[in-house]
């Protein structure tokens, strides 16, 4: 009985053979597709490998170009410093009347030379600092210091400029502010750039410099001015290299367009960030937020840092 159930009629056998042939054709067709896909994948892999090799080559070329640019900027900056220093020294001698008196027009021309040399020196210094940052040659040297000392040094630096200005530079005395363990030279550089920009673009009113504890681990320094302000669409681009926003004040004042870009990079080296709020015709507030204690650096005890005679020199 079981044998009878397994018997097939000739028609059934032909149908099974046809199904077998169709299945075989499908398998062959699928195998062909698999072979084609395998070949395409192999070609794609070869293309990806070639692309990675090209990208590596381009990356190497870009690195070489960046290194060459940094070396060029560093070399040219050093070469410019010597003649600029001589120009400023001669201008000071002339203004001090060491070689004889000057009439009003001569004094005006010498001051123009002195101011131009000073502006160019600032540009050269920015170029040199930028070259060092891009080359990874900036050394971070953290130490404990007091905010009062930092503000006092900045106040003294800008006093000669502000004595002849119609605007007020106000340093809000730090109150209940802990000591900071970071690179005070880099922090001072950042704040100097903020204040210098505020002085350039503020014709009347005041510039207010302050500091407060942002949270348990960070401090916020602010430089607020009553200057011309910055349009919202330009707030991001001002931190790019060589960027200068077109304005009537910008036409009167020259600069490298590197100050804010350099400040942003120095802030990042200190583990912090920069924020800016501004409104056209009202003024701007630049803020730098940095850790109270610089990450990745072991801080000596504050008692050891406070040994008499060992106080770090600011600026």
Image (tube, rainbow, N blue to C red):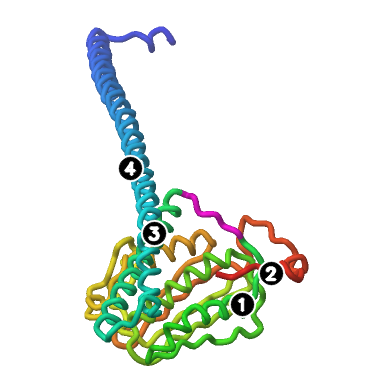
Is mark 2 in CB contact (under 8 Å) with mark 4? no
Measure the C-alpha gap from mark 2 to mark 4. Answer: 42 Å
User: In the rendered structure, which segment of residues is drawn in magenta?
Assistant: 136-141
Q: Quadrant of residue 293?
A: bottom right
Crowding at label 1, few (<14), some or many (≥20) Cα neighbours within 10 Å? some
Please identify, in this view, whether the residue under mark 4 or under mark 3 is nearer the observer: 3
Is mark 2 in CB contact (under 8 Å) with mark 1? yes
Measure the C-alpha gap from mark 4 to mark 3. Answer: 24 Å
Apparent side of residue 274 relative to residue 150 in the rendered image (left or right): left
Q: Quadrant of residue 160?
A: bottom left
Please identify, in this view, whether the residue under mark 3 or under mark 2 is nearer the observer: 3
Is mark 4 in CB contact (under 8 Å) with mark 1? no
Whichever of callouts 2 and 4 sits on the residue coming sooner in the sequence is 4
Please identify, in this view, whether the residue under mark 4 or under mark 1 is nearer the observer: 1
Q: Give residue 81's mark.
A: 3
Q: Give residue 65's mark.
A: 4
Q: Give residue 149's mark.
A: 1
Measure the C-alpha gap from mark 3 to mark 2. Answer: 30 Å
The residue drawn where x is 33% and y is 82% is 101
Whichever of callouts 4 and 1 sits on the residue coming sooner in the sequence is 4
Image quarter (top left, top right, bottom left or bottom right) of the C terminus: bottom right
Question: Residue 132 at what x, y percent from top left?
Answer: 45, 53
The residue drawn where x is 66% and y is 76% is 178
Q: Give residue 295's mark.
A: none
SS class of the residue under badge 1? helix
Question: Residue 104 at what x, y percent from top left?
Answer: 27, 86
Q: Is residue 50 above or below residue 219?
A: above
């Amino acid at each position: 009985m079981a044998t009878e159930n397994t018997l097939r009629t000739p028609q059934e056998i032909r149908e099974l053979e046809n199904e077998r042939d169709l299945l075989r054709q499908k398998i062959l067709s699928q195998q062909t597709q698999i072979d084609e896909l395998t070949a395409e994948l192999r070609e794609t892999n070869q293309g990806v490998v070639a692309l990675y090799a090209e990208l590596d080559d381009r990356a190497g070329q870009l690195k070489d170009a960046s290194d060459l640019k940094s070396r060029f900027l560093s070399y040219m900056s050093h070469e410019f410093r010597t003649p600029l220093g001589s120009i400023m020294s001669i201008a000071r001698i002339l203004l001090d009347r060491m070689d004889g008196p000057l009439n009003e027009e001569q004094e005006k021309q010498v001051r123009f030379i002195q101011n131009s040399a000073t502006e160019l020196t600032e540009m050269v210094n920015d170029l040199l600092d930028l070259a060092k940052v891009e080359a990874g040659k900036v050394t971070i040297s953290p130490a404990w210091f007091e905010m009062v000392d930092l503000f006092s040094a900045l106040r003294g630096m800008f006093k000669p400029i502000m004595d002849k200005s119609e605007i007020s530079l106000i340093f809000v005395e730090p109150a209940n502010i802990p000591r900071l363990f970071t690179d005070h030279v880099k922090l001072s550089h950042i704040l100097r750039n903020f204040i210098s920009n505020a002085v350039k673009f503020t014709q009347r009113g005041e510039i207010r410099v302050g500091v407060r504890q942002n949270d348990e681990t960070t401090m916020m320094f602010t430089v607020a001015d009553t200057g011309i302000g910055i349009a919202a669409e330009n707030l991001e681009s001002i931190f790019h290299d060589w960027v200068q926003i077109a304005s009537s004040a910008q036409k009167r004042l020259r600069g490298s367009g590197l100050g804010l870009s350099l400040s942003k990079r120095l802030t990042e080296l200190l583990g912090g960030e920069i924020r800016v709020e501004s409104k056209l015709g009202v003024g701007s507030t630049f803020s730098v937020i940095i850790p109270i204690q610089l990450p990745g650096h072991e801080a000596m005890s504050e008692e050891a840092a406070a040994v008499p005679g060992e106080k770090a020199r600011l600026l």
